[in-house]
């Protein structure tokens, strides 16, 4: 399986690095929910998107790879 990134929103957390509502890039595969054990597989999106769609973080043609 390729390491393809997906934009995800944190909906429940016990990790202080990822507060509720944080947008992250995850290599979780295509699914509706994902549980990360330690957050090492998540990368927070480091800027405010405002009213833009989270998909803009993936680029015009999607995640390169």
Image: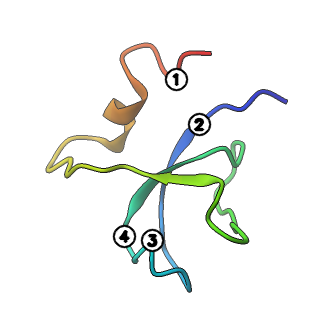
Badge 3: residue crowd in 10 Å (few <14, some 14–19, many ≥20) = some
Residue 14 percent coordinates (x, y): 56, 86
SS for callout 1: loop
- Check whether the beta carbons of the residues at disc 1 and disc 2 lie within 8 A of each other: yes
Identify the disc placed on residue 28: none
Residue drawn 69% across and 51% down?
Answer: 31
Q: Earlier in the sequence, mark 1 or mark 4?
A: 4
Residue drawn 70% across and 68% down?
Answer: 35
Q: Which residue is mark 1?
A: 63
Identify the disc placed on residue 5: 2
Report the label total. 4
Q: Earlier in the sequence, mark 2 or mark 4?
A: 2
Alpha carbon of mark 1 to alpha carbon of mark 4: how far? Answer: 22 Å
Image quadrant occupied by the N terminus = top right
Q: Which residue is mark 3?
A: 18
Image quadrant occupied by the C terminus = top right
- Check whether the beta carbons of the residues at disc 3 and disc 4 lie within 8 A of each other: no
């Amino acid at each position: 399986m390729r390491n393809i990134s997906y934009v995800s929103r944190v909906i429940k957390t016990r990790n202080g690095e990822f507060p509720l509502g944080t947008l992250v890039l995850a290599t979780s595969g295509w699914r509706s929910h994902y549980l990360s054990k330690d957050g090492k597989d998540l990368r927070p999106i480091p800027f405010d998107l405002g009213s833009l769609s989270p998909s803009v973080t993936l680029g015009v043609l999607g995640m390169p790879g």
